[in-house]
Amino acid sequence: MKTKINVNYIGSSFDRHNHEICNEHYTNKMEKYCDENSLKLTPLRRKVFEILIRDHKPLGAYQILAILKKEGFASSPPIAYRVLDFLVEKGFVHKIQGLNSFIACSFAGCEHLPAFIICRKCDNVAEIKSENTFPPASDTALDFKIEEAMIEILGICPACDVSRVI
Amino acid sequence: MKTKINVNYIGSSFDRHNHEICNEHYTNKMEKYCDENSLKLTPLRRKVFEILIRDHKPLGAYQILAILKKEGFASSPPIAYRVLDFLVEKGFVHKIQGLNSFIACSFAGCEHLPAFIICRKCDNVAEIKSENTFPPASDTALDFKIEEAMIEILGICPACDVSRVI
DNA sequence: TTATGTTATGTTATATAATAACATGTTGGA
DNA sequence: TCCAACATGTTATTATATAACATAACATAA
Ligand SMILES: [Zn+2]
Ligand SMILES: [Zn+2]
Ligand SMILES: [Zn+2]
Ligand SMILES: [Zn+2]
């Protein structure tokens, strides 16, 4: 099964890009949002977000803790989990359940239902908007009030797919 | 956001149903499949599946272990995880990542991409087929070879939705 | 300014989920 | 009968996440 997938974010681990600009873009978005909603963008919160967006790859809480430690921050588990809770709640970061890990949002400031495509060969992950695919259109039985959804698609990205037609 | 969702399985925790018949239906399916593929449907495997399908609710590995213990089976963690691996691999059971738990498949013997709707009030879960919604149709950029997907939809079921129009 | 409430950061200990490594039993052919 | 493959069993450990409690930083009202 092959599918064309929408990728209209600024930067991702799938694409070479100027991460200076990319990083600045997302940081600006976050600063603006926190400003407008009187949320405190503390050094720790900045740091964790910066760690996550560095190479656009999902990181587990304990990986983040290790980096925090190396870079001079406190590093007991609740430190990471609390900051991650904040970042997830405010929409700057998403949790990828299938990997027990966290990734910086690629559509910050833009209302969206996130979904993820995960290459199981190179471990890169891209966030996509799921408006196209969601909610599931159907013709029967059950009215269900949807609040949230978790969509994680596993497969092989073009770069890793040797059998692909160019 | 409200959506009509397809529910063409035999029995689920959302519906009153004759579970005798239901249980027999799924057990037969599983027996037939194992027979045809020379897989061993051992007492332990039967038991774990029966525990899972009892009330069609997702159970964590350690909940399953507790039941196994009460009912006279061995109950160290690998016991459950190995049987669950088997049942998941053969498609009789699915793992719900968002809940760290396992649920009996509602479409056994029928090729499908599973998806789940989870009521966060009553904790009931229904499996739906995701053909309608998946793969995501789109118009751009990235060819991605899809192998597997995890779709878990969280919300409020009709029974729990007080504000619903009848 | 001090007092006070609130939010953020910090610690230790613990709960929960999953796997590694290895031992024993069972079963079905060569 | 012997062997190979598979299933079940044990103990110990790793990985992930939270509880409970203590202190610090910060705002703002008296
Ligand atoms: Zn970047
Ligand atoms: Zn996002
Ligand atoms: Zn039933
Ligand atoms: Zn299924």
Image: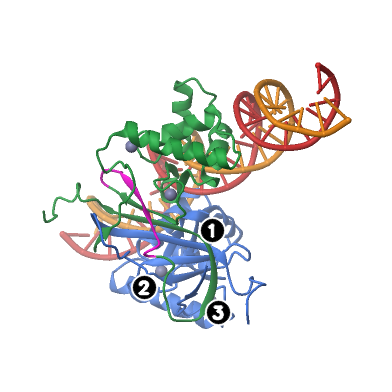
Chain colours: A green, B blue, C red, D orange
Q: Amino acid at mark 2?
A: Asn
Q: Which residues are magenta?
A: A121-133
Residue A135, above or below B69: below
Residue A71 sits inside the magenta stretch: no
Q: Residue B94's quadrant in the figure?
A: bottom left
Q: Residue A56's quadrant in the figure?
A: top left
Q: Is residue C8 left or right of residue A3?
A: right
What chain is tagged by disc 1? B
Residue A17 visible from this viewpoint? yes
Q: Residue C29's quadrant in the figure?
A: bottom left
- Looking at marks 1 and 3 on the same chain, the residue that comes earlier in the sequence is marked by 3
Give the CA separation, mark 2 to mark 3. Answer: 28 Å
Q: Residue at x 32, y 42 (%)?
A: A11
Image position, residue C12 (x, y; %): 64, 25
Q: Determine crowd level at label 2: few under 14, some 14-19, many 20+ residues with C-alpha closer than 10 A.
A: some
> Is there a contact, CB below 8 Å, between mark 2 and mark 3?
no
Q: Nearer the viewer, residue B63 or B75?
A: B63
- Looking at marks 1 and 2 on the same chain, the residue that comes earlier in the sequence is marked by 1
Q: Is mark 3 within 8 Å of ligand 3?
A: yes
Which residue does the numbered mark 3 point to in the structure image? B19
Which residue does the numbered mark 1 point to in the structure image? B73
Give the CA separation, mark 1 to mark 2. Answer: 41 Å
Give the CA separation, mark 1 to mark 3. Answer: 24 Å
What chain is tagged by disc 2? B
Q: Amino acid at mark 1?
A: Phe
Identify the mark at residue B132; answer none if there is no mark. 2
